[in-house]
Amino acid sequence: MRTTTDRAVKQRSSAHGDATAANAQTVPVRGRGAGGGGVAGIAAKAFRAVPGPLLGLIAVMIVFSVLSPYFLTGRNLSNIVTQNADIGIMAVGAALVILIGGIDLSVGSTLALSLMTSAWLYRSAGLPFELCVVVGLLVGAGVGFVNGVLSTYGRIQPFVATLATMSAAAGLALYLTNGNPINGFPEWYLAITSEDILGIPLEAIILVGTYLLAAYWLRFRPSGRALYAIGGNAEVARLSGLNVTRIKIGVYVVAGFLAALAGVIVGSRLDSAQPTAGTADLLNVIAVVVIGGASLSGGSGGMLNTFIGLLIIGVLNNGMSLLNVSPNLQPVVIGIAIIVAVLTDRASRARHT
């Protein structure tokens, strides 16, 4: 009896040892797979860590550098940034609004109204131009305040509210001077887009500084982090103690102010205040934010990807101009880029869920 029991115990021990050895042999095999710690796995993880918009920017730059020998010149790359500084500044405000689940269609018209207000006060009222610029910035912030009040206290959908202010601001910009442009501004104003600091154009410094300030606010300030909470679920954010209404109005004010700041850039670059300035930039502004990966439903997005989206739009417009693509076809390419960006972002989110 005892001999039989000992034999059974040994058999079970031997079987257990064989199973353990087999398991031990299979563990390294799994670790060397594509999802493990091998070279392929590390490369795949590194590739996934790279922002999607950055990969798109690299691809577009490679294509245009092959198609045009003038694309990768230092002067041309500098022009891509400076020529899109106004769009980039407006895109910061638009991204903040989209982050809280809203939309601002009035940024272009706000630019025009603030610029025409400054020029009209300077030419007709004879006020110091420094004061006129400040008033123009306040006008932009005022339009943003109206947008915020209409979409919060008025409970009007942001799309409808900003569509109304877009129309009103565009009409007022034309009314101030009966549709006529105003030219001839002080030298210090023109220097904003003609001077450089240590070889860097001043308007590029303003552009990058705007993005850095917005990124710092979103990343390190509680009021900036609150934007993600509001965009994710405004009711939950309110129950958590956040003053959702005040924050939303504040974001729209910031967006209006930045649109007016973009108007300063445009007026300085052209040495002229045009009542239709900026009104055609809405597509590019929204495209920058969407291509940058911001979700139109709110709660996701950031300044780094928005800046990359700006560079993608700038490279597309610049490259198509170098290749003599018809200006009538360029918006078609931008529209396709928006669709591709949205589909790519949706596929990426599906893979991570």
Image (cartoon, rainbow, N blue to C red):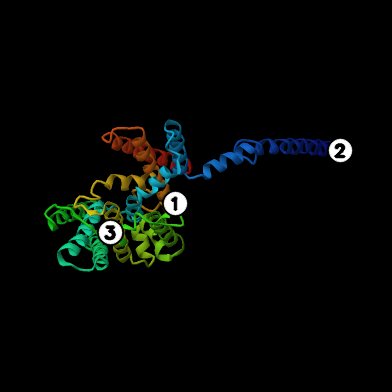
Residue depicted at x 26% and y 55%: 267
Q: Which residue is mark 3?
A: 260
Is 37 left or right of 103, judged from the image as shown?
Answer: right
Q: Which residue is mark 2?
A: 1
Residue depicted at x 23% and y 63%: 139
Is 9 left or right of 247, judged from the image as shown?
Answer: right
- Label 1 environment density (alpha carbons within 10 Å; few <14, some 14–19, many ≥20): some
Residue type for callout 1: Leu
Which of 192/351 is in front? 192
Please identify the quadrant where the N terminus is shown: top right
Q: Secondary structure at mark 3?
A: helix
Q: How many marks?
A: 3
Q: Rounded to the nearest whole Å, what is the CA distance between mark 3 and mark 2?
A: 97 Å
Q: Rounded to the nearest whole Å, what is the CA distance between mark 3 and mark 1?
A: 22 Å
On residue 304, the disc is: 1
Residue depicted at x 31% and y 64%: 250
